[in-house]
C-alpha cells in the first residue's frame, strides 16, 4: 500500500535482496525497430528474442515492449522536438530529504537525480558486461594503468545560479559522502576512495585504495551537490537542518530545478535553463504527485490525472492496455523470486529432496497465472539479463513422477492415503513469506497445492517483514518464498559464500567449498579485459551448474517491469536502472 | 464544576503518560528498527550500526525511554565543535549571543582500531589497541589487512599512511605493522579567527592560564584561522541555548522535528475532519428528525433503507467506486489530494472524501437521531405542549429538538478524536496529506517519534473530547451537575 519497495527490499553490499514487491525494477532491451503505424508502437526485441526472453509474435495492443534492460519509444522519424508542456508522475512516497546524503528512499534518489548531476550516466547494458558510462558533467576521464586512480575533466557548465560546477564541488560531495557526522546510509560505496585531488576548477583525480573493476561506478554513485550552498551548513549540523528544500531551490545542476514541494502532495520541478545540454529539457515541468495507494494511482492514470505510473502490477496491466490514451512499457527487471530451503535442516538437507520439490512445483503455471505472462520461468541463478548468465540451463520440467522417484531414493514413499512418509513420519514443513505481499502469498498457495498432489503437507506462515528477516538470518525456518533485487555487478558472495551464513544473506545455510572458491575468484576478476572475461564466464558457468544441481533455491520467476505512460509522450526510455531515465529528452507529439 | 474539570484534566495527564509509555515500548520492542528498512544494495550493516548509535539504538530500551522522555522536556544546548591544527573549538549559544572557546587537544591514552563488520567476516580482522607510553609515543603492533574504524574515521590497512587528524594523531601502516605518533604543534599564545563568508570582524582568542582560549563572543558567519586547518561555520546569530522545552523528537526518516513535520498534516486532517463532521451532523440530524416526524411513511422507510445501505458499505470500496465513476468515467472530480489554487478547485477535491466520511457517518447519526426524537415524542411534556395548543413546528423545534440532542452531544464529544485521527483508509485512497497517512508510513518505517507523537495527539483528543462531551451535556441538560 505504502512504500512497498523500501519496506520489502533487503540488501547487501552487492546484491539487493528484494524480499518483497521489488518486482517493479526493470530491465530494458535494445531497440530493434518500430512499427510506425501510429497505433501499436512496438519495439521489436531482437536480443530478447534471441535469448528466448521474448515472444517474437505480435504483442498485445498498445505495448511498448523492451528487450533486456530498457524499453524505448523513439520519436517518429524526422520529427522535430516540440518544446513546452508538462508531465505528471504518480509516486508512492514523499521525498525524505532533498539532500542526497541524508536520504535513503528509492523515490527520493530518482527525484534528486533530476536536480543534481552525476559525473557520468550508467548505461543499462550489464547484459553485455560491466556497465559502460556516458559522459555527463565529466566530459572525459582517463583510468591510470595501475587502476588506482582516475583523472577526470569536467565540461564547462554551471549551477542554475550561474556559479560554475567545479572540481571543488566534486571533492565536497565526496567529503559529504564519507563524513561520519553526515552518516550517509550508503557511505560504504566510497570506502575504496582514498582522496579526490583537485588540480584545477575543471580537473581532478580520484584516488582509490584498491584496484577493482567497479571504481568508476563508485565515484559515479556520489551525486554532485553545490558546495557554495550546501557548504553553508557544517556537516555536523546536516542532520538537524530542516531547510534542504530551500538550498536545493537555490542551485541545481541537473536538467531540472526544484520549483515547489508540498509535503505529502506534490513535488514540482521545472526546466533548468542553465542545463549544459540545452535546449533540453523540452518539457517545462514535471509534477510528481504523491499517492497514498496503488489502486487510486491507477485510477488517476486512467483518468488522466497522472501521465506515468511505474510498478503497474501484472494483474492490472490489462486496465492500462485497454485505456485508449495509455501505453504499457515492459522490460526485464533486475530481480527474481525463489523458494529457499534450509539446507541444514531435515528433510531439506538432502539435495534429492530439493531437486524433487523443484520438479514437483509447476512454475510455468505460477508465471502464467499470477504474473499474467509478465514474467519468465527462472532457471540459472544468475538471471538471464546479466552477462554471466548461463542461459543454456533450462528450468526443471514439471514432472511429478520424477519427483516421486527422487523422493523414493531419499527414503520417502507414499502410504495408502497417498501421503509421503519416511520411517513412519509424514513429510510436513512450514513455508514462510512476508505478510502484506500478495504475490508471494499467492505463490505459496500454488506451491502448497502442487506439493499436496504428491503427498506433502506444507503450511503457510505469514510473518512481518522485519521479523522474517531476523528468523532467516538465524536460519530458524524450513523454507521460504522471497526475492532478490540485484545490483549490476555480479557478486554472489553475500548470498552463497559460506562466510555469509553468519549474519548475512546466506539464509539457506548452503555451504560448498568449490562454490566459495569460485565466488572468491570471480568477484574480483577484471572483466573489462576480454581474455579475463572469457575466464570469468567459465567461473560463473561452473557456479551456476553447482546451484542448478544442488537446488538450494527453486528459482521461480524473473519478473518484467510494467510502466504505464500516456501515449502523447515520445522519446521515452524506461530502464531497469532508473524509471525516470531520460525525462529531459521527452516531448509531446502533436 | 471547576474542581471537576481540574480533576479530569489531571486524570487525563496520567492517561496520556500511560499511553505514551505503552506506545513507546510497543514501537521499540517490535522486531526491526527504523534502520533495517534502509538496508539496500549499497548499505552495509556497519553503516546501519553507525546510524543506530547516532539515534541511541545501541542502548537498552529502558535507557532509551528515559533518555527520550527527558529530551521531551529539557533541551541540551546546541554546541558546534570544530578542530584543526591541534586545537578544538566549541561554539555554543549564550544569553547575549554565541560564544566561542578554544582548547588544546589532548592525545588519547589508548587508540582502538575496530574492524568493520565486513573486514571481520571476510578477512578475519581483529581489534587492535595501541597504548600511549610515558614518552608520549604509541606502541607498534601487527595488524591484519582490512578496514578499521578509529573513532568515527575509517582507515584501510591497504593504505600506506592514514592521518587521523581529529585527535592530533597519525596512524601509520607498513609491512603488517601499525604504529601511531602524536603530531601536535606547540600551543600558540593566541589564535585569530579571520572572517570569511558572511562574517565581518576578526576574533582574537587569547590563551588563559588554564590553557583554554577565550571565551569570546562570535557572530553568525564563516571564520578561518590563518595557516589553515580550521573552518568555523556559525549558522545562526544565537544557537539554541537549551532549557525547558516541549520537544517531541525528530522524525528519523524525514530528519525533521516531529512537530514541524506533523503540523501541516494535522491541519489537512482537521480540515477534512471538520467538514466531514459538519455534514455528518447537519445531514444526519436533519434526516433523523424528518424520519421521526414522518415515521412509518415512505419517506421514513426510504431514508432508513438508504442509511442502512451507506452505513454497511465498506468505506474503501465506496471510495474506489466513486473514483471510478466520477473521475475515470465521468471526469468530473479529481482523485489526488487537496488541490491548490482557487476556492472551487478546493471544493472539487473535498467533495468525494467528505462524502465518503461524512455522509456514511450521517447514516449512523440519522438513525440515532430518529430514535432519540421518537423517544422524546412520547414524553409527557410534549403531550402537554401539544395539549395546550402550541403549534406543531414550535413543539418540534423548541421542545423535541433540544431534548433529543442529548445523545447526539455525547456522540459528538466522542467523535472529537476523529478530527485528528481522521480516517486512515480514506486518506490513503484520496492521497490526502493527513495524519493518518503519516501514521501508517511511520509505523511501517518504525519512525518511533512520529508514531509516539500521533498516538499522544489522539490520546489528548480523546481526553478533551470526553471532557467536552460531559460539559456540553451539563449545559444542555440542567439536571446534570458536574462535581
Image: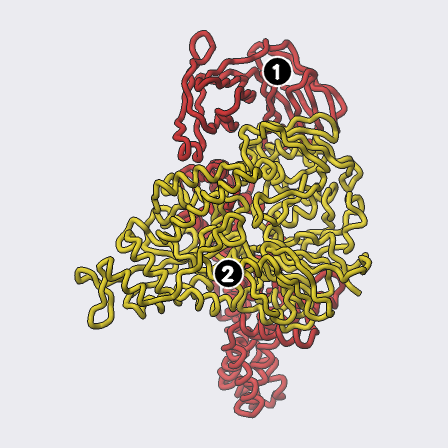
Chain colours: A yellow, B red
Q: Is residue A557 above or below residue B169?
A: below
- Indicate whether A69 appears above or below B62: below
Mark 2: secondary structure: helix
Tag 1 secondary structure: strand
Q: Residue furthest left?
A: A423
Instruction: Estimate the x, y position of residue A300 in percent, counting from the top left.
Output: 64, 67
Q: Which mark is residue B439?
A: none
Please indicate whether residue B451 sits to the left or right of residue A259 in the image.
left
Q: Is residue B400 visible?
A: yes
Instruction: From the top left corner, tell me how far across and down residue A170 is, in percent.
Output: 67, 33
Look at the image and tell me whether residue B238 can be seen.
no
Taking the spot 55% from the left edge, 44% from the top edge, the residue there is: B250
Q: Where in the figure is residue B144, as x and y percent of width and height?
A: 42, 24
Using a 10 Å C-alpha cutoff, classify the residue at mark 2 as few (fewer than 14 neighbours), some (14 to 19) or many (20 or more): some
* Mark 1 lies on residue: B213
Side of B52 where A124 appears, left or right = right
Q: Residues within 10 Å of mark 1 (few under 14, many from 20)?
A: many
Amino acid at each position: 500500500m505504502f512504500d512497498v519497495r523500501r519496506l520489502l527490499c533487503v540488501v547487501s553490499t552487492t546484491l539487493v535482496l528484494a524480499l518483497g514487491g521489488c518486482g517493479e525494477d526493470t530491465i530494458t532491451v535494445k531497440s530493434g525497430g518500430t512499427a510506425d503505424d501510429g497505433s501499436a508502437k512496438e519495439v521489436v526485441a531482437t536480443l530478447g528474442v534471441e535469448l528466448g526472453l521474448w515472444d517474437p509474435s505480435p504483442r498485445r495492443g498498445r505495448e511498448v515492449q523492451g528487450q533486456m534492460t530498457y524499453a524505448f519509444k523513439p520519436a517518429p522519424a524526422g520529427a522535430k522536438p516540440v518544446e513546452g508542456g508538462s508531465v505528471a508522475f504518480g509516486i508512492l512516497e514523499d521525498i525524505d530529504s532533498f539532500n542526497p546524503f541524508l536520504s535513503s528512499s528509492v523515490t527520493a534518489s530518482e527525484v534528486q537525480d533530476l536536480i543534481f548531476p552525476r559525473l557520468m550516466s550508467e548505461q543499462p547494458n550489464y547484459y553485455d558486461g560491466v556497465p559502460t558510462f556516458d559522459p555527463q558533467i565529466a566530459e572525459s576521464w582517463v583510468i591510470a594503468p595501475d587502476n588506482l586512480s582516475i583523472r577526470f575533466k569536467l565540461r564547462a557548465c554551471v549551477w542554475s545560479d550561474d556559479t560554475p560546477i567545479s572540481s571543488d564541488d566534486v571533492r565536497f560531495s565526496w567529503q559529504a559522502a564519507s563524513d561520519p557526522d553526515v552518516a550517509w546510509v550508503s557511505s560504504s560505496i566510497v570506502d575504496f576512495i582514498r582522496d579526490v585531488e583537485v588540480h584545477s576548477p575543471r580537473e581532478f583525480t580520484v584516488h582509490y585504495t584498491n584496484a577493482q573493476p567497479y571504481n568508476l561506478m563508485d565515484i559515479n554513485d556520489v551525486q554532485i551537490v553545490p558546495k557554495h550552498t550546501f557548504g553553508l551548513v557544517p556537516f555536523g549540523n546536516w542532520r538537524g537542518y530542516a531547510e534542504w528544500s530551500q538550498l536545493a531551490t537555490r542551485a541545481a545542476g541537473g536538467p531540472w530545478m526544484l520549483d515547489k514541494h508540498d509535503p505529502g502532495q506534490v513535488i514540482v520541478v521545472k526546466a533548468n535553463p542553465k542545463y549544459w545540454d540545452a535546449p533540453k529539457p523540452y518539457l517545462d515541468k514535471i509534477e510528481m504527485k504523491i499517492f497514498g495507494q496503488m489502486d487510486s494511482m491507477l485510477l488517476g492514470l486512467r483518468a488522466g490525472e497522472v501521465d506515468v505510473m511505474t510498478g503497474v502490477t501484472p494483474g492490472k496491466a490489462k486496465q492500462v492496455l485497454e485505456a485508449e490514451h495509455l501505453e504499457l512499457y515492459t522490460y526485464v527487471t533486475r530481480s527474481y523470486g525463489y523458494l529457499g530451503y534450509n539446507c541444514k535442516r531435515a528433510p531439506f538437507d538432502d539435495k534429492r529432496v530439493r531437486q524433487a520439490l523443484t520438479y514437483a512445483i509447476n512454475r510455468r503455471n505460477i508465471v502464467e497465472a499470477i504474473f499474467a505472462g509478465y514474467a519468465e520461468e527462472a532457471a540459472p541463478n544468475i538471471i538471464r539479463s546479466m552477462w554471466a548468465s548461463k542461459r543454456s540451463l533450462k528450468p526443471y520440467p514439471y514432472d511429478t513422477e520424477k519427483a516421486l522417484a527422487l523422493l523414493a531414493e531419499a527414503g520417502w514413499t507414499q502410504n495408502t492415503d497417498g501421503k509421503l512418509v519416511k520411517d513412519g513420519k509424514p513429510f510436513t514443513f512450514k513455508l514462510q513469506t512476508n505478510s502484506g505481499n500478495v504475490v508471494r502469498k499467492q505463490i505459496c498457495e500454488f506451491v502448497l497445492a502442487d506439493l499436496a498432489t504428491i503427498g506433502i503437507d506444507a503450511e503457510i506462515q505469514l510473518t512481518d517483514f522485519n521479523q522474517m528477516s531476523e528468523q532467516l538470518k538465524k536460519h530458524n525456518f524450513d523454507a521460504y518464498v522471497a526475492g532478490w533485487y540485484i545490483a549490476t555487478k555480479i557478486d554472489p558472495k553475500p548470498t552463497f559464500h559460506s562466510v555469509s551464513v553468519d549474519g548475512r544473506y546466506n539464509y539457506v545455510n548452503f555451504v560448498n567449498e568449490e562454490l566459495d572458491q569460485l565466488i572468491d575468484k570471480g568477484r574480483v576478476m577484471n572483466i573489462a579485459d576480454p581474455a579475463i572475461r572469457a575466464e570469468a564466464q567459465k567461473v560463473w558457468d561452473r557456479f551456476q551448474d553447482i546451484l542448478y544441481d544442488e537446488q538450494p533455491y527453486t528459482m521461480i520467476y524473473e519478473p518484467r517491469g510494467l510502466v504505464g505512460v500516456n501515449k502523447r509522450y515520445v522519446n521515452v526510455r524506461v530502464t531497469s536502472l532508473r524509471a525516470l531515465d531520460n525525462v529531459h529528452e521527452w516531448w509531446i507529439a502533436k | 464544576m471547576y474542581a471537576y474539570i481540574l480533576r479530569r484534566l489531571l486524570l487525563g495527564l496520567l492517561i496520556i503518560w500511560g499511553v505514551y509509555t505503552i506506545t513507546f515500548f510497543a514501537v521499540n520492542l517490535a522486531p526491526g528498527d527504523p534502520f533495517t528498512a534502509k538496508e539496500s544494495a549499497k548499505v552495509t550493516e556497519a553503516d546501519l550500526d553507525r546510524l543506530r548509535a547516532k539515534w541511541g539504538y545501541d542502548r537498552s530500551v529502558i535507557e532509551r525511554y528515559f533518555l527520550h522522555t527527558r529530551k521531551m522536556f529539557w533541551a541540551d544546548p546546541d554546541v558546534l565543535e570544530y578542530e584543526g591544527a591541534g586545537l578544538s573549538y566549541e561554539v555554543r549559544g549564550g544569553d547575549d549571543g554565541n560564544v566561542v572557546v578554544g582548547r588544546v587537544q589532548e592525545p588519547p591514552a589508548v587508540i582502538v582500531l575496530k574492524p568493520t563488520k565486513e573486514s571481520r567476516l571476510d578477512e578475519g580482522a581483529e581489534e587492535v589497541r595501541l597504548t600511549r607510553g610515558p614518552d608520549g609515543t604509541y606502541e607498534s603492533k601487527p595488524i591484519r589487512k582490512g578496514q578499521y574504524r578509529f573513532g568515527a574515521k575509517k582507515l584501510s590497512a591497504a593504505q600506506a599512511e592514514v592521518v587521523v587528524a581529529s585527535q592530533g594523531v597519525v596512524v601509520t601502516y607498513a609491512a603488517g605493522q601499525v604504529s601511531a605518533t602524536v603530531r601536535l604543534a606547540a600551543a600558540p599564545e593566541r589564535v585569530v579567527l579571520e572572517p570569511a563568508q558572511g562574517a565581518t570582524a576578526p576574533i582574537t582568542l587569547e590563551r588563559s592560564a588554564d590553557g583554554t582560549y577565550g571565551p569570546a563572543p562570535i557572530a553568525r558567519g564563516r571564520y578561518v584561522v590563518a595557516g589553515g586547518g580550521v573552518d568555523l561555520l556559525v549558522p545562526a546569530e544565537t544557537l539554541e541555548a537549551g532549557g525547558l522545552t516541549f520537544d517531541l523528537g525528530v522524525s528519523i526518516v524525514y530528519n525533521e522535528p516531529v512537530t514541524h513535520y506533523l503540523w501541516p498534516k494535522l491541519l489537512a486532517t482537521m480540515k477534512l475532519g471538520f467538514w466531514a463532521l459538519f455534514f455528518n451532523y447537519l445531514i444526519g440530524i436533519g434526516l433523523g428528525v424528518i424520519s421521526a416526524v414522518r415515521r412509518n411513511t415512505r419517506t421514513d422507510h426510504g431514508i432508513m433503507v438508504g442509511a442502512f445501505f451507506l452505513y454497511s458499505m465498506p468505506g474503501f470500496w465506496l471510495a474506489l467506486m466513486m473514483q471510478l465513476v466520477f473521475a475515470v468515467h465521468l471526469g468530473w472530480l479529481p482523485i489526488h489530494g487537496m488541490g491548490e489554487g482557487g476556492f472551487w478547485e478546493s471544493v472539487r477535491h473535498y467533495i468525494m472524501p467528505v462524502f465518503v466520511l461524512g455522509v456514511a457517518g450521517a447514516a449512523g447519526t440519522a438513525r440515532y437521531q430518529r430514535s432519540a426524537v421518537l423517544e422524546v415524542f412520547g414524553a409527557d411534556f410534549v403531550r402537554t405542549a401539544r395539549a395546550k395548543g402550541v403549534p406543531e413546528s414550535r413543539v418540534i423545534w423548541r421542545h423535541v429538538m433540544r431534548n433529543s440532542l442529548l445523545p447526539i452531544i455525547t456522540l459528538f464529544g466522542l467523535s472529537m478524536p476523529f478530527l485528528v485521527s481522521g480516517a486512515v483508509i480514506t486518506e490513503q485512497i484520496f492521497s490526502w496529506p493527513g495524519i493518518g497517512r503519516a501514521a501508517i508510513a511511520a509505523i511501517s518505517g518504525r519512525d518511533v517519534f512520529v508514531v509516539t507523537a500521533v498516538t499522544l495527539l489522539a490520546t489528548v483528543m480523546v481526553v478533551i473530547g470526553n471532557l467536552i462531551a460531559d460539559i456540553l451535556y451539563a449545559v444542555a441538560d440542567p439536571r446534570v451537575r458536574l462535581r
